Amino acid sequence: MIQDISMAASAEASGRASARRNNKSTDTAKIRLLDGAVKIDGKLYSLHPGVQIWKRRGVDKLIVRVFLANGTTQTKSYPITPDGVSKANEQAKLNAKEITSYGAEFGALSVMERQAIEFYRQYEKECIGMGIQPCGVLNVLLKGIEWAKAATCGAPLFPKVMEEYLKYVESHSGEKHIIRQRGLAKHMCAYWKKKRINDFQESDVKAYLKTIKGRKGAKPASWTLAANFNLIRALFAYAARHRIIKSDMNPTLAMDCIDTGTTAEPEVMTCEEVKRMLVWCAQSESWQNMLPVLVLGVFCGVRNAERCRMRWSDFRPGGRDEIYLSRVITKTNNARVIPISPAMSAWLDYFAELGFPISSDEFIVKTDVDTEKCREDRQGAFIRSARKAGITIPKNGLRHTAASNLSVTLGKSAAADILGHSERMLIRHYRRAMTADDAKELLSITPQSLGLC
C-alpha cells in the first residue's frame, strides 16, 4: 500500500516536471530572440535601437528607458508579444524625437562645455574614491551661474576694454606699432568714456567717424578715417574673441572698410629738385644734421618711422657693405638688407667728414628728448621748414622717388625686397615710371657733384 502511494506521488511529480519542460519548449518555439529583431510565432518583428531585452525573474522582457523632466530616468518593460513590441518601439521613437528636439533647441555642446562635463565626471570619481558624497551637478551649475553672472553681466566700459586690447597688441607687436594706436585710442576713450562695450550700434561708430577732423579743422584724409575705423574694428573683434561680448554684437560686422584708394599718380621728385633739397639742407645751420634722413629716403626708400628707429651702427654692420634694418626697425616686423650703392658710399664718407658719429649706437635723428615720437616730430618740422623755404618735397616724395629709381635700375622684384613690401604693392602705390637716364642721373648725385666737398 505504501509502495503504491509512493509510486503514485513519484508519477505525479514526474508529470508536473514533464509538463513544465513541454511548456518551455512550446514558449521557445513561439519566441526566438535575434539581433535587432524578435521572432514570434514564426513572424519577424524589428526592434528600435532604443529597445533592449532583459531577463526579469527568469522571463525575457522588452525594456525602454524613459527620460523624465526632473533629469532622472524610468525603466518601462513590455512583454515579448506583437503588441508589446509595438508599444516598446513607439516609446523608443518618442524618446529619440525628444532628444533630437532638445538638441535642436539648445544647440550642440561646445568644446568647453564638453570639457566641463568631463571635469565634473572626474570630480565625482575622485569624491567616490575618497568615500565622499559628491556635490550634485545641479548645485555645481547653480553656483557656477552665480559666479558667471557676477563676472559677465556687468559689461566693462569702452576705455577699460581698449586698455586691455592695447596691452595685448603691445605684447605681440612691440612699442613701434602701439604709438599711433594709443594716440587714436585716447580720443575714442574720451568720446565713449561712459559707454559700455555691449551697448554699441553701427550708428555709434559712424557718428564717431564723422567727428574726426583733419589739420586745422579740414576734412580728414581717407587714411586717417581708415586708421580709426580699423582700430575700432580690431577692438570689437578682440572683445568677441575673448568672450567679452557675443560675436553678433560687434557693430562693425556689416560695415565696409574705408576706401583709401586714389586715382592720383604718386608724385616723385626730379633730379633738379633732389639736388636743390640736398644743397639747402647741407648749407642750413639749423637742419644740417637732418641730411642723413634725406639721403636714406631718396636713395634707399627707408620709411619715415623706420628712419626714426635707425642708429648709425646699422650702416655697414660687421664690415659688410650694406644697411641692415632689423625687425625692431621695420614696419612689417621683417628684417631687410639694403645694399650700399657707390653714391650712398660717397654720402657716408661725407657724413664722417662733417663729424657725424658714424658706427656709434646713437640714433640718426637727434633730439633733446630721446623718444620715437619726438624724433618723428623733428622730421615733420624739418619737412615743413624745407617747404617754407621753397623746396619741393611732395607727400611721401622721398620714398616714391627711391621706389621709381630702384624699379628702373634693379627691377621690380629686387626693388620690392629693398623697400620691404610685395611687387603688387610697389606697382599699386609707389612706382612711377622713371627713364633710365633720370635714374642714372639720380644715382650720380654725390657731395662731390654738388660741390659740398
Image (spheres, rainbow, N blue to C red):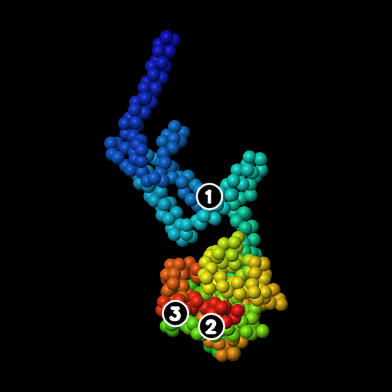
Task: Identify the mark nearer the N-term, 1 or 2.
Answer: 1
Residue 19 screen position, x and y as percent: 36, 24
In this picture, is 305 found above or below 98? Answer: below
Taking the spot 42% from the left edge, 16% from the top edge, the residue there is 9
Left or right relative to 186: residue 61: left
Q: Which residue is mark 3?
A: 438
In this picture, is 253 found above or below 34? Answer: below
User: Do the residues under discs 1 and 2 have CB atoms within 8 angstroms?
Assistant: no
Taking the spot 55% from the left edge, 81% from the top edge, the residue there is 450
Residue 20 found in image quarter: top left
Pair 1/2: label in front = 2
Q: Which mark is residue 388?
A: none
Structural distance between the alpha carbons of marks 2 and 3? 13 Å
Structural distance between the alpha carbons of marks 1 and 2? 89 Å
Pair 1/3: label in front = 3
Q: Which residue is mark 2?
A: 275
Label 2 amino acid? Lys
In this picture, is 214 found above or below 104? Answer: below
Residue 308 screen position, x and y as percent: 62, 73
Q: Residue furthest left?
A: 42
For label 1, the SS is: loop
Q: Is residue 75 visible?
A: yes
Residue 451 screen position, x and y as percent: 57, 82
Q: Which residue is mark 1?
A: 72
Which corner quadrant holds the C terminus? bottom right
Task: Identify the mark nearer the N-term, 1 or 3.
Answer: 1
Label 1 amino acid? Thr
For label 2, the SS is: helix
Label 3 amino acid? Asp
Task: Identify the mark nearer the N-term, 2 or 3.
Answer: 2
Taking the spot 44% from the left edge, 35% from the top edge, the residue there is 55
